[in-house]
Amino acid sequence: MKKILILLFTIATISSCSNDDDSSTTQIIGEWKLMEAKFYGLEGGDSSEGSIDYSDQNIIYDFQANGTLTVAGGENAGYPNGTYEYFFGEDHLIGTDGPETLIVKVNESKWAYDLTNEKMTLGNSYVDGPDLVFERK
């Protein structure tokens, strides 16, 4: 009887585990509305911050499961309207040293990825570019 209970417990434990890679790769898929672009350093002016508010516009970044990103809705600090290839996963932001982090690579540009409080940030400020802030549509 004890062996059966141990076997059932083991099966339940194994079946309740999920693959974190699967959930992390799907967290970007879908339509995201661009809310704001934040600028730091050179693009933000003389060591001050700057930003562009896009919340009243309908600029949509649609990350599809097949690795295609479609941008629609107008001019913005990220990408013009069009279709792009993207990669979402762990990689080095710069070079090959140091730890890998979650990134979004659109064509050849790498963006640091963060999802906090239902807002996605694609950051390029590590190379004096903008940080794009999105909300899921």
Image (tube, rainbow, N blue to C red):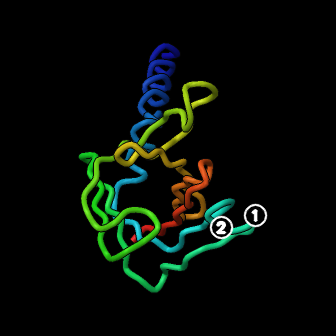
The picture quadrant where one finds residue 44 is bottom right
Secondary structure at badge 2 equals helix
Task: Please tell me which residue lies in front, 127 or 97.
Answer: 127
Q: Is residue 63 above or below residue 137?
A: above
Query: x, y percentage for residue 114?
Result: 56, 52
Residue plotted at (34% across, 66% down): 80
Q: Which residue is mark 1?
A: 47
Q: Is residue 25 above or below residue 119?
A: above
| Residue 16 can be seen, yes or no | no
Q: Is residue 33 left or right of residue 44?
A: left
- Find the distance from the CA under tag 2 to the CA under tag 1: 7 Å
Residue plotted at (50% across, 49% down): 111
Residue plotted at (68% across, 68% down): 45
Are circles 2 and 1 on residues that touch, CB within 8 Å?
A: yes
> Which amino acid, by three-letter code, is at mark 2?
Gly
Q: Which residue is mark 2?
A: 44
Query: x, y percentage for residue 13?
Result: 49, 29
Residue plotted at (47% across, 33% down): 17
Find the residue positioned furthest to the top. 3
Q: Is residue 13 above or below residue 128?
A: above
Q: Residues within 10 Å of mark 2 (few under 14, many from 20)?
A: some
Q: Residues within 10 Å of mark 1 (few under 14, many from 20)?
A: few
